[in-house]
Image (cartoon, rainbow, N blue to C red):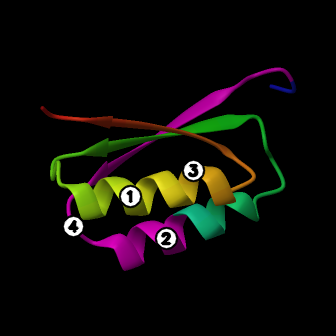
Amino acid sequence: MKGMKVSIIIAFYKNTAALELIIKALALQTYQRFEVIIAEDDNNKITKEFIDALIHSSPIHIKHVYQL
């Protein structure tokens, strides 16, 4: 399992405080071979800006996908 990479998918809808806590907790994990995919169902400008800020400030790899 040493070389295994894990994808963590987070389904997200409007709860930015919970999402921030999840990302902070994931950044503290000892196993770091993972990526985080945030699947958002609330495509609005404020949420996108919040997630973009998380992506740029977090030490982990985060990918943001959303509905158009």
Of the numbered discs in the image, which one, if any, rests on residue 55? 3
Residue 29 against residue 5 in the figure, above or below: below
Return the x and y of residue 66 as percentages of the image width and height.
24, 37
Q: CA distance from mark 1 to mark 3?
A: 10 Å
Residue 34 against residue 45 in the figure, above or below: above
Q: Amino acid at mark 3?
A: Ile
Disc on the earlier residue, 1 or 3: 1
Return the x and y of residue 41 as percentages of the image width and height.
16, 47
Of circles 2 and 1, which is in front?
Answer: 1
Q: Residue furthest bottom?
A: 17
Q: Secondary structure at mark 1?
A: helix
Of the numbered discs in the image, which one, if any, rests on residue 14? 4
Of the numbered discs in the image, which one, if any, rests on residue 20? 2
Disc on the earlier residue, 2 or 4: 4
Q: Are marks 2 and 3 in contact (CB under 8 Å)?
A: no
Return the x and y of residue 12 as percentages of the image width and height.
28, 55
Disc on the earlier residue, 3 or 4: 4
